[in-house]
Amino acid sequence: MRFLHLADLHLGKVLHKQNLLEDQKFILHEILQIAEERQIDAVLIAGDVYQRNAPSAEAMTLFSNFITEFTIRHLPCYIISGNHDSAERIAYLAPLAQRSNVYISGADTAKIYQYTCSDAYGEIILHLMPFTTPMQMRTAAPDQADEIQTYNDAIRILMQNHTVDTRKRNILIAHQFLTGAQVCDSEELAIGGLDQVSASLFDDYDYVALGHLHGPQQVERPEIRYAGSPLMYSFSEVHQRKSVTIVDLLEKGHVHIETVPLKPLRNMQILSGSFEDLMQMPRCEDYVQLTVTDPVPPVNAARAL
């Protein structure tokens, strides 16, 4: 079965007062084209659908239209809430959406949702774990509350209380920060690394579809993967190569992973130089961060540039 792994859409994001909805609409259309060209069977969205827990009407409409396009193509969608999302809002009307094979899992307490699909090789179990905090886990497991101090404690106990049939193929969709992963300025991370989770907790899963970190990357093994955000959301991401991840889950023990590059409506650049040199540069439509190196820049430098 072939899955399209996405994460961190951050719909409604504003970059230095610039609304990115036009850029996001463009990239979502490109992702739909990739899904068609690569003959995707199902879609995994690993959290942070929205930028804010109370998203704008425009952002919600954009996401609704995006998911509707998948349902028109009869492609099941499996979606979890991230730390930027409101668990309750993202799961609004989830029972109704499930009738169209859109499975939305958001929870204000620690919980893993489980769904089953199948292909020529047999059953695939999808485990959906919305963004989980130690506080949520202490509420869900009060008898073990004293053991839960860090995110790793929370996820470890959540996994201990969740059954995985390792004879079958299992996919976990999660939105957490794994130890050893590369970060950038876009992510909201806890001071001192208290939100880090060990990848070894996910050993029972054939593929782990992660969200939270914006750079596409694997952690410890290729099958534990961050899809990354589809667009650059800060200038710290300027060197990242955005992509979508395509996962072919074959017979047990055989997983093929491919990334397909994304081409945004506008790129990002970081430039520096004297005020005069920067003023002579050709006009472009990219999002540009400029550093003026003059010892004493002109008073109107920012406005003129």
Image (cartoon, rainbow, N blue to C red):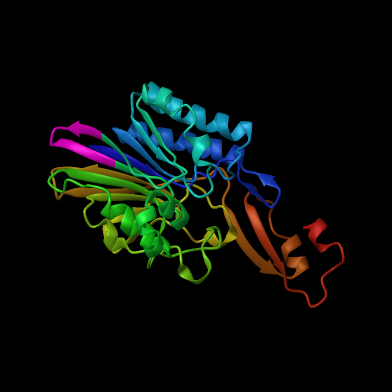
State the residue at coordinates (45%, 51%). 136
- Name above or below for residue 200 compared with residue 39: below
Numbered range of the magenta stretch? 116-126
Is 298 on the left-hand or right-hand side of 250?
right
Is residue 213 visible in the rendered image? The answer is: no
Is 268 on the left-hand or right-hand side of 277?
left
State the residue at coordinates (54%, 48%). 84
- Name above or below for residue 101 compared with residue 151: above
x then y, percent, for residue 185: 55, 62
Query: In the image shown, does 291 or 148 lie closer to the viewer?
Result: 148
Q: Is residue 259 magenta?
A: no
What's the magenta bit mostly, secondary-structure-wise?
A: strand
Residue at the far right: name it.
299
Is residue 212 visible in the rendered image? The answer is: yes
Is 201 on the left-hand or right-hand side of 213?
left
x then y, percent, for residue 295: 79, 78
Query: In the image shown, does 31 or 106 lie closer to the viewer?
Result: 106
